[in-house]
Image (cartoon, rainbow, N blue to C red):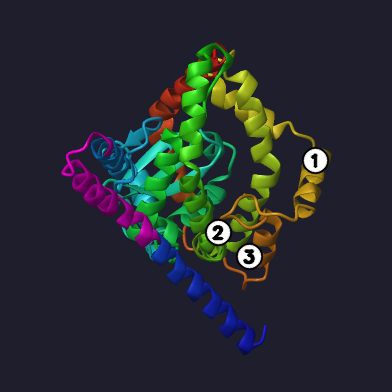
Amino acid sequence: MSSDSLSASGLSVGLTRIASYALACLVHLLGPAFLVVGVYLLFRMTIFAFFLGVVALGLAWLVRPRVPRFPADVQPLTREEAPNLYGLLDRIGSGVGAPKTDAVALGGMVNAAFGTYGWRRRRLVIIGYPLWIILTPQERIAVLAHEMAHSSNGDARHGLFVGSALDSLRELRELTRFDWREHDGLDNLFAQSLLALAALPVRVLIFALELLLHRSSQRAEYRADELGARVAGSRAMVSVLDALATRVPSAEGFLEPSAVVVGASDLWDKLQATVVEVPDEELERRRQASREEKASVDRTHPPTYLRMDRVRQLPHLEGEVGAAEVEKVQPELEQAAYRVAGTIRDAARSALYH
């Protein structure tokens, strides 16, 4: 790529980043604007103005700045409970230039995530135990390094200003989500339909903000892969990306039907056995299907095969953190992993009756 192309690309990303901050600013100004209008209308002292004033104050409350809460469906681990895990995260964080992790939690998703919670934007790493258990020790380092890199790679989604605007809009979208079912009645259908229609501007704002963040978010994913390869090694980073296309579908396919009938104490052993038993021919078929995928996994993640190709093009790296440091962590996770298995089983059984 020529220097002119790189310059144009950088300028484009810079302009979309400025536009995303401008749109986030608009979102943050909506609350004060509705508040001022609401107070003004209330003091007009007419019935119609009073009604509109109450509506405006309600809107001001709904679009108020929100920050993500600590997730309710995960099992937190303190530094006292898991000193080796926190030590590993500190070591990985140093390698990717990330600040120290404030909190770690185990969850039931076949994934891992970095996020923040609270007004102080405390940093949280969530380890999906179903993913953790099907990875090798070196792949686990690669996953953790990738997630922690998001706190230092310039991803605006995790920043206070843009991130809190997105959090507010997404929570408002959830509050206004159309969730009518046949037994809810026609009056509820009418009310929910009106609410969903009134919330269309919220969905438009979310779409516009995510569209503006699309390119920078994808660049942030590539950058996180590069930093992950530096800490875990190029081979481990490619291997864990391959696992997303090959092993993860097996884990997801196992958990949905099996969590209902498999006991919490056996769930992880059976999950591992299921993933191991997938024939090589099926794994290769999934790899090929992944390479034929032209679209992104979502708005923030580029296609997995492109991420793998990008890592392979990097100078070969052996990695800064070894598997031996991961093996000390496993005993610290056992009790929380058992509770996660129980949560998955309870959720699966509850879903049978809804």
Labels 1 and 2 touching (C-beta < 8 A): no
- Above or below — where is 202 with respect to 96? above
Q: Which mark is residue 211?
A: 2
**Nearer the viewer's eye, disc 1 or disc 3?**
3
Left or right of 278? Residue 201 is left
Residue 27, quarter of picture: bottom left
Residue 71 screen position, x and y as percent: 37, 36
**Nearer the viewer's eye, disc 3 or disc 2?**
2
Residue drawn at x 20%, y 48% as measured from the top left: 40
Residue at the outermost front position: 46
Q: What SS does tag 2 mark?
A: helix
Alpha carbon distance from label 3 to label 2: 25 Å
Q: What SS does tag 3 mark?
A: helix
Alpha carbon distance from label 1 to label 3: 23 Å
Most frequent secondary structure within the magenta stretch = helix
Alpha carbon distance from label 1 to label 2: 38 Å
Q: Residues within 10 Å of mark 1 (few under 14, many from 20)?
A: few
Residue bearing the label numbered 1: 280
Q: In this orientation, does residue 214 appear?
A: yes
Given the image, on which type of amino acid does mark 2 rest?
Answer: Leu
Residue drawn at x 58%, y 44% as measured from the top left: 136
Residue 131, quarter of picture: top right
The question of residue 342 being in magenta is answered with no
Residue 323 screen position, x and y as percent: 50, 50
Residue bearing the label numbered 3: 311
Given the image, on which type of amino acid does mark 1 rest?
Answer: Asp
Q: Which mark is residue 303?
A: none
Labels 3 and 2 touching (C-beta < 8 A): no
Q: What SS does tag 1 mark?
A: helix
